[in-house]
Image (tube, grey):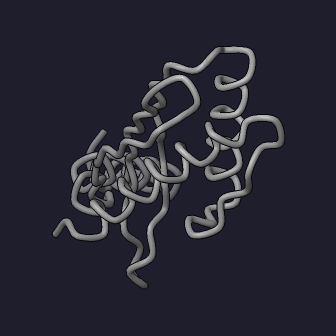
Amino acid sequence: MTIKDLGIREWLVIAFISIGLLAFVFEDKFKPKIYEAEGTGIGYAGDITLKVKAYKKKDKSLRVTEIQVIHEDTDVIGGVCCTKLVDDIKARQRLDKIDMVAGATFTSEGFKEAFTEAIENIKNQE
């Protein structure tokens, strides 16, 4: 079989394989740069530390991709509060308006303080 004997189906298969290989080669070039920052706030039983990962969109706004929480509060109240706040931020992407969790006011305030610090650090990164 020579190149001249190839039909349209074979040429399409070759084209799709080539496009797929090029996508792997250029994948890192078009991937957004992920910025990381850490923030600390005062919770009910101790400090709340957040490690935030986000990328900047073309309009200079941020898109949060990951939030890790380290806290000294109880898992029953503080842990549930932090999990709810993380889920809310990741779902809504409203970085300036963080709702408080009823029954965990100090933890919510500490989380908000830590998150605001981390976001400001990311905004200042180049």
Indicate whether 44 appears above or below 9: above
The mark tally for this picture is: 0
Residue at 30% x, 61% y: name it.
122
- The answer to which of 101 and 31 lies nearer the viewer is 101
Residue 20 locus on image (x, y percent) = 38, 48
Q: Hey, which residue is sitting farthest right in the picture?
A: 102
**Location of residue 38 (image quadrant):** top left
Residue at 42% x, 38% y: name it.
50
Q: Hey, which residue is sitting farthest bottom in the picture?
A: 59
Residue at 45% x, 25% y: name it.
70
The N terminus is located in which quarter?
top left
Q: In the visual, does 30 lie left or right of 104?
A: left
**Location of residue 57 (image quadrant):** bottom left
- The answer to which of 114 and 25 lies nearer the viewer is 114
- The answer to which of 104 and 15 lies nearer the viewer is 104
Residue 53 locus on image (x, y percent) = 38, 47
Q: Hey, which residue is sitting farthest left in the picture?
A: 126
The C terminus is located in which quarter?
bottom left
Indicate whether 81 appears above or below 112: above
Q: In the visual, does 123 lie left or right of 46?
A: left
Residue 91 locus on image (x, y percent) = 69, 52
Residue at 81% x, 35% y: name it.
103
Q: In the visual, does 43 lie left or right of 47?
A: right
